[in-house]
Image (spheres, grey):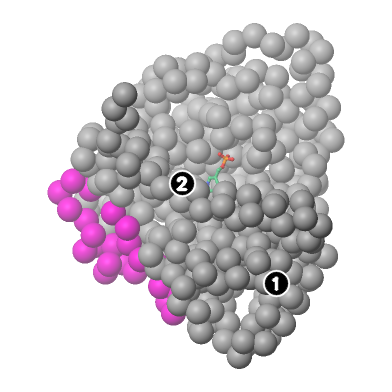
Amino acid sequence: MNVAQRFSHIPSPAIRAMVERSQQLEKSGIRVAHLEIGRPDFDTPEVIKAATKAALDRGEVHYGPNAGLPELRKAVAHYMSERRDVTWESDQVLITNGAIEALYLSLMTVLEPDDEVLIPEPCWTAYLGIVRLMNAVPRLVPLQANNGFDLDLVALRQAITPRTKALLLNTPHNPTGVILERPSLEGIAELAQEHDLLIVCDEIYDQICFDGQTPPTIAALPGMQERVALVCGFSKTYSMTGWRIGYVALPHPLVRPALLAHANIMSSVNTFIQYGALAALTGGGPAAALMSAEYQKRRDEAVRLLQCMPDVFLTPGGGSFFLFPRFLKFRDDQQLAQRLLEEAHVATVPGSAFGPTGAGHLRLSVSCDLQSILEGLERMHQWLTARN
Ligand code: PLP
């Protein structure tokens, strides 16, 4: 059987190799510090679980509307409008199987085969697969550590071709943690307007921000709401990664095509889980704030410890779970990650897994408990010192 050509361009997630090897080490009794995994270590807040169980008990087990429950779409529109200072109507919101499906749907509305999508890199690895599955082409635009991983507007402009249809933004960012600030967003908006691009903006870490920041959104800039698909979800904020629920707010003309794609691929999102998501938006705020405060504590500790390590250069971002230090004496980050795992028992993800500009970096996540972070970074420090 001939497998379709598109799959030859899709990388396997690098994190899997790390997780599998860590598990082998743990089976042999070794304690591994898991700084590789980007998912919250908390349980889903009780208020969300209770609403979901109640929905199940009420018999909310049938197909729901393709676009999502009206009350949930309304709550999402309200939440997004309040938090981002732009008004969305509930009929612009689609409930999806995680933010990842929302990314697919948004891009699918505008891409023809061989069209190009600008992707700042390093980036979440799934972006490349998403674009390739549509027979479109990712065009990578490097984010440089010495520029604070800010988007270089000159490089962005140079990457635009007549086939460029969309730009995939992510703020706060995986893997660097960087929040795009208003001046950068304004430059990006100008380019998008000039070249008639759709901006798909992944704001899945919108509530995991440090030092009281609320990240600005490109959708709130003048004239931009009509060319931004704003993607978000419940996975990270409410520790609901396994529930598989997210959403997107779309410009009016893109709602129908996105809904057609969703209806034909997914039909609808699990009905009783949508009631849990509704409870997250209406009553999950305090629990989300507690988790966020805990990430801040862990991240501050991790930043402090990394800044004491020899030959480590860190640009700490203002959000997400991730830190993306560069190890100045180790260009080969794959080998560095492997050695840290085998010799210091610290699991990380090699930076080059997120794109070529990630070479020499490691991604560390603070979504595991503080004790593991402290132990892991102490072992990393000792390991680096012994090789200095
Ligand atoms: N977007 C980014 C940048 C991510 O890092 C992740 C998960 O790691 C997702 C989206 C996936 O979100 P969801 O679980 O809602 O599909």
Q: What secondary structure is marked by label 2?
A: loop
Place of residue 73 in the rendered image (x, y in percent of width and height, measured from the top left)? 58, 27
Side (left or right) of 62 relative to 289 = left
* Pointers 2 and 1 in contact (C-beta within 8 Å): no
Side (left or right) of 92 relative to 37 = left
Place of residue 344 in the rendered image (x, y in percent of width and height, measured from the top left)? 70, 72
Q: Nearer the viewer, mark 2 or mark 1?
A: 1
Task: Name the residue carrying label 2.
Answer: 12
- Distance CA(mark 2)–CA(mark 1): 25 Å
Place of residue 178 in the rendered image (x, y in percent of width and height, measured from the top left)? 53, 65
Classify 260 as above or below 216.
above
Name which residue lies at 40% across and 40% down.
Answer: 130
Residue positioned most to the front = 28
Label 1, residues with CA under 10 Å away: few <14, some 14-19, many ≥20: many
Q: Is residue 194 visible?
A: yes
Name which residue lies at 81% across and 21% down.
Answer: 53
Label disc, if present, on residue 323 of the rendered structure = none
Task: Name the residue carrying label 1.
Answer: 344
Q: Is-magenta flag for residue 97?
A: no
Query: Any atom of ligand 1 within 8 Å of the CB at mark 2?
Result: no
Q: Amino acid at mark 1?
A: Ala
**What segment carries the magenta color?**
139-165
Please name whichever residue, 218 or 158, is drawn nearer the observer in this view of the structure.
158
Q: Is residue 88 visible?
A: no
Place of residue 370 in the rendered image (x, y in percent of width and height, measured from the top left)? 80, 64
Q: Quadrant of ligand 1?
A: top right
Q: Where on the picture, by quarter, is residue 26?
A: bottom right
Please name whichever residue, 307 or 9, is drawn nearer the observer in this view of the structure.
9
Sequence-wise, the earlier of marks 2 and 1 is 2
